[in-house]
Amino acid sequence: MNIPRILIGAGASGSGKTLITCGILAALQERGLNVASFKCGPDYIDPMFHSQVLGTRSRNLDTFFTGEKVTRALLEQNARDADIAVMEGVMGFYDGVGGTTTQASAYELSRMTRTPAVLVLDCRGMSVSIAAYMKGFLEYRGDNQIQGVILNQLSPMLYQRMKGLLEKELHLEVLGYVPKVDDCVIDSRHLGLVKPEEIPDLLERLKRLANILEKTMDIDALIEMAKGAPALEAVDLKQEDPCFAWHLPEPLPVAVARDDAFCFFYEDNFRLLEEMGAKIIYFSPLKDREVPREARGLMLYGGYPELHAKILSRNRSMRKSIYKRITEGMPCVAECGGFMYLHESMEDMDGNAHKMVGVIPGGAYKTPKLNHRFGYVHLSHGVEGVFGQEVGEIPAHEFHYFDSPNCGTDYLAKKPASTRSWECMHSNGQLFAGFPHFHYYGNPQVAKAFLEKCLQYSHRKGKR
């Protein structure tokens, strides 16, 4: 597995790594390279920006969910035909699970995949202190993979002097600088960043940024650094876990809600479902009138349903269709925003309640700040298992500003590197719904249990 690859990390969140990563992707594409992009960690929004630049879907690489071997396998699968793979880090380079570990950090991803790392450093208010700051990152872990730095928000007049200082004292390759670019700022929202389609002329902005980076960065040196990444031993997932080899005896159509309200996906989840024999059918709870009639399973993922609560409520035929399908026994997976949609009501961003599907008693409501139940968790002690099957411990992630009086009690969520835990999930053998998000490569038995339940439901439907 010989893939040229680079990881763009940062000293801290807010250093500009998403914007600069998108600019680098655009610059590489302008050169005619076939680029594969990845986001470190559970973020849904940043891959949307990568995809907007490249025109192809970006992927997540998350070592908490998938560990070293499966993460490497996902890298290989998704970058197999690419000229170069670009990974965007998460938070600060060493920041990981629990706030006190490096687990699931950009550092861990670069180490496990032996990917050269380049740090984006916000240089506002610094000069010589930049050297001391970078020296700390270089010495904190001996296997850090850091080979270069990009100096963001640095004066062009200061750049050559700082480049000479850093390369002389730290033997670190300085790949360039990024001046202040006011018209390329990406605004934040309650779940992170706004979606790319909400930013006027985004592609034009990023192309302008790419042209700036061609002048202020050494893109050729970045490419050479990526080419220097060592070959990795290929991983056969079917040997790692026999569940990856499991396949339905017949193709089954599964309906997946996908529109502006439901847009948070790990794209690799769909790959695994399709490899197991599912036929994915996308539909829109905002625009369509009913769940696709041929569907034998239903998946409602997260997104921003609260921003579209009025339209979702007014689409009564869709709400009735989903209610009817679920109460008739169709297997359903619902995560976070999809879980909120299944409630009797849901508040919008102004606190106004709107009628929803009605499968989950109670109303989802807005809270003033990020819910205290957030971050990585392990789910265990499922009373009914997942669709009636015991699947073992399940890695998951929560991040939401909304809450519910009826979050479920069928699983226990435990924080890693912490003593905190809480009950969650509705899991009754036919429904698997709650605030946690799941990556099926972290526990493929979850996907298998869902599809087996869909097969049972399909056979019952066929006998009627």
Image: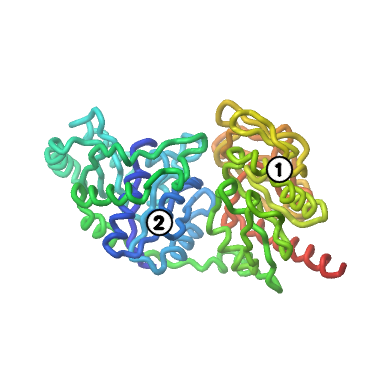
How many angstroms separate mark 1 from mark 2 (CA)? 32 Å
Left/right placement of residue 353 relative to residue 198 reads right
Residue 267 on image: x %, y %: 53, 57
Q: Quadrant of residue 139?
A: top left
Task: Say if residue 145 shows up in the picture.
Answer: no
Left/right placement of residue 55 relative to residue 249 reads left
Q: Looking at the image, which is closer to me, 50 or 5? A: 50
- Numbered label tally: 2
Q: Quadrant of residue 58?
A: bottom left
Q: Secondary structure at mark 1?
A: loop
Crowding at mark 2 (Cα within 10 Å: few <14, some 14-19, many 20+): many
Answer above or below: position of 99 versus 276.
above
Q: Amino acid at mark 2?
A: Ser
Left/right placement of residue 16 relative to residue 298 reads left
In primary-sequence order, the first of circles 1 and 2 is: 2
Q: Quadrant of residue 266?
A: bottom right
Answer above or below: position of 298 versus 77.
above
Q: Looking at the image, which is closer to me, 94 or 387? A: 387
Image quarter in which the C terminus is found: bottom right
Image quarter in which the N terminus is found: bottom left
Judging by the rendered image, the residue that carries numbered circle 1 is 425
Answer above or below: position of 204 versus 14.
below
- The residue at 70%/73% (across/down) is 250
Q: Amino acid at mark 1?
A: Met
Q: Secondary structure at mark 2?
A: strand
Q: Looking at the image, which is closer to me, 461 or 288? A: 288
Residue 269 on image: x %, y %: 57, 58
> Which numbered marker is on residue 447?
none
- The residue at 56%/68% (across/down) is 239
Judging by the rendered image, the residue that carries numbered circle 2 is 37
Residue 400 on image: x %, y %: 58, 36
Residue 325 on image: x %, y %: 78, 55
